[in-house]
Image (cartoon, rainbow, N blue to C red):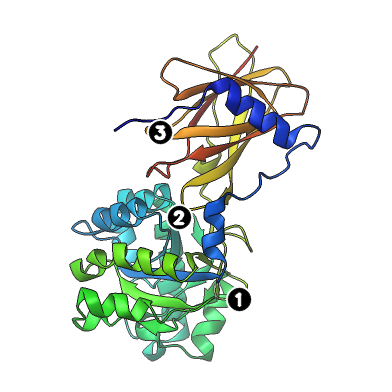
Amino acid sequence: MTRWIRPRSLILTTAAALLAGAGAIALAAPAQAASCENGYVGLTYDDGPNPSTTNQLLNALRSNGLRATMFNTGQNAAANPGLVAAQVSAGMWVGNHSYTHGHMTQMSQQQMQSELSNTQNAIRNAGGGTPTIFRPPYGETNGTLQSVASSLGLRTVTWDVDSQDWNGASTAAIVQAASRLTNGQTILMHDNYQSTISAIPQIAAGLTQRGLCAGMISASTGRAVAPTGGGNPTTPPPSTGNPTTPPPGGGSCTTTYTAGQQWSDRFNGSVTVNGSNNWVVTVTLRSPQRVLATWNASVSWDSSGLVMTARPNGNGNTFGMTIQHNGNWNWPSLSCRTA
């Protein structure tokens, strides 16, 4: 397959033309963003993570350009912390689905509190951040449970469409259920069914045909929204900032990566440098990613096209880039040293 590679000078010239004198102005949305003209829906998967299916599920979602919310049980998160981290690395959001998946409306308030707080801790300890949305098992809730959830900073979220995958629904039936989604609605699916994983390519195609995109669930409204519209359903884990320390004797600086606007084929990110105004940041992409544009830094590349070196260009200590992910949603790795 022939791959067209943009000359790096054209990348920088294009970025400069778009952003000159404007600081960190967001790039114009690419044509692909028009596919979201009819809004956003929430794809949700309960009961994970599971060693036998979670990686398959994540691969299917990523290869079809979809993001989803994973409502994890605390006991599964505690038993499979690496899979929680994999969910986050794949660009998914993580929600609370209780610790043991019991009938919570039959529990005492103290038991409810334990179920939810233990799940918060299990997900946080596994690198999944601190969830801000909670899906009650079986959709069963009452005033006491919602009060307990609110006390932990959790909004209770159920669903609008039930895929019936838990009830033996076929792949075709799951795809048909997803076709009923409208703007802001969410669909209930589960982590551990092959029929559900097999439905993902057709769900993705159906959303595109209907001008809908897979979005995140707002902790403010409980509705599906654009990924940049209203916050993240998880508070990022402490490691998200990618702190780096230079070799001894080279001064000190650290970097923080912040996710920006995202489309089906690309995403924006910004890097903030702390500790020095005279820095050199090395940005290493995840193959087969490519940078399409940069702003607020002078950049150069190595021969592989995957390692970018950024230096100050007089526009402060925050710079940004647009990355064409080519199926790899992982954020770039960063290292920092002083010049």
Q: Amino acid at mark 2?
A: Arg
Q: Up-down: is 328 above or below 199? A: above
Q: Amino acid at mark 3?
A: Arg
Asked if the residue under mark 1 is in contact with the one under mark 2, i.e. CB atoms within 8 Å, the reply is no
Mark 2 vs mark 1, CA separation in Å: 23 Å
Q: Secondary structure at mark 1?
A: loop
| Residue sitting nearer the eye, 255 or 203 | 203
Residue 81 appears in view: yes
Q: Position of residue 310 (x, y in %)?
A: 61, 22
Q: Nearer the viewer, mark 3 or mark 1?
A: 3
Q: Is residue 282 left or right of residue 52?
A: right
Label 3 or label 2, whichever comes before in sequence order? 2
Which residue is farthest right?
A: 21
The residue to which callout 2 is attached is: 124
Label 3 or label 1, whichever comes before in sequence order? 1
Asked if the residue under mark 1 is in contact with the one under mark 3, i.e. CB atoms within 8 Å, the reply is no
Q: Quadrant of residue 201?
A: bottom left
| Residue sitting nearer the eye, 173 or 192 | 173
Mark 3 vs mark 2, CA separation in Å: 25 Å
Q: Position of residue 116 (x, y in %)?
A: 44, 72
Q: Is residue 23 left or right of residue 111?
A: right
Label 2 or label 1, whichever comes before in sequence order? 2
Q: Up-down: is 139 above or below 225? A: below
The residue to which callout 3 is attached is: 286
Q: Secondary structure at mark 3?
A: loop
Query: Mark 1 packing: few (<14 Cα in 10 Å), some, or many (20+)?
Result: few
Q: Amino acid at mark 1?
A: Thr
Q: Which residue corresponds to the image point at 69% horizontal and 25% vertical from the top-left?
A: 275
Q: Which residue corresponds to the image point at 29% horizontal and 52% vertical from the top-left?
A: 59
The residue to which callout 1 is attached is: 221
